[in-house]
Image (spheres, rainbow, N blue to C red):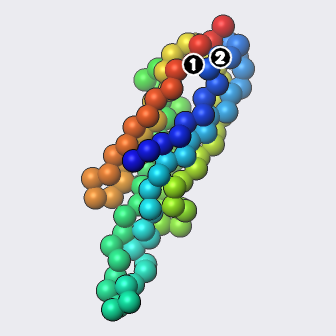
Amino acid sequence: MAALINVPAKARRGDIIELRTLTSHIMETGFRHTADGKLVPRDIITSFICRYNGAEIFRADLFPAIAANPYLSFFTVARESGTFEFEWVGDNGYSSTASAVITVE
């Protein structure tokens, strides 16, 4: 699935920066029924992790109430140049990753 990542390309050491992610996923809750009464199976993203140069800096557990195409926004301190790695994991073997690089001056 596709993901949109917004990370500043550059920051000064010590700056507080905002990271924003948007990923494409239907997020079927498992509570709906089809026209013939059958339960539509649950298919959601269950967790999101962000790592900064390999160290986990943000984690979120997601539940059926999360909207389709979940958007997450959070803040961190720019400490050093490097890579942000984003990982989404979900039902039915779903897994998606993305990354972004930042230069810290």
Residue 84, given in percent of the width and then of the height, sits at 50, 26
Left or right for 100, reference 18: left
User: Is residue 56 visible from the viewing direction of this image?
Assistant: no
Residue projecting furthest to the bottom: 36
Q: Residue at x 53, y 40 (%)?
A: 4
Query: Label 2 sits on what residue type?
Result: Lys
- Hey, what amino acid is under mark 1? Ile
> Nearer the N terminus, badge 2 or badge 1?
2
User: Residue at left 67%, top 33%?
Assistant: 18
- The location of residue 62, given as percent across then percent down, is 48, 56
Tell me where residue 3 appears, x and y as whole percent.
Answer: 48, 42
| Distance (Cα) linking label 2 and label 1 | 6 Å
- Quick check: 53 left or right of 96? right
Furthest residue to the top?
A: 105
Q: Where does residue 32 sit, x and y in percent of width and height? A: 43, 80
Q: On the image, numbered disc 1 is attached to which residue?
A: 102
* Mark drawn on residue 67: none
Identify residue for label 2: 10
Give the image quarter of residue 39. Answer: bottom left
Residue at figure coordinates x 39%, y 84% from the top left: 33
Q: Secondary structure at mark 2?
A: strand
Near mark 1 (Cα within 10 A), the count class, few <14, some 14-19 or many ≥20, is some
Q: Are marks 2 and 1 in contact (CB under 8 Å)?
A: yes
Is residue 100 visible from the viewing direction of this image?
Answer: yes
Q: Which residue is rendered at x = 55% and y = 46% of the image?
A: 22
Q: Secondary structure at mark 1?
A: strand
In this rendering, the answer to whether 33 lies above or below 90 is below
Quadrant including the C terminus: top right
Note whether 36 is above or below 54 in the view shown: below
Front in this rendered view, residue 86 or 9: 9
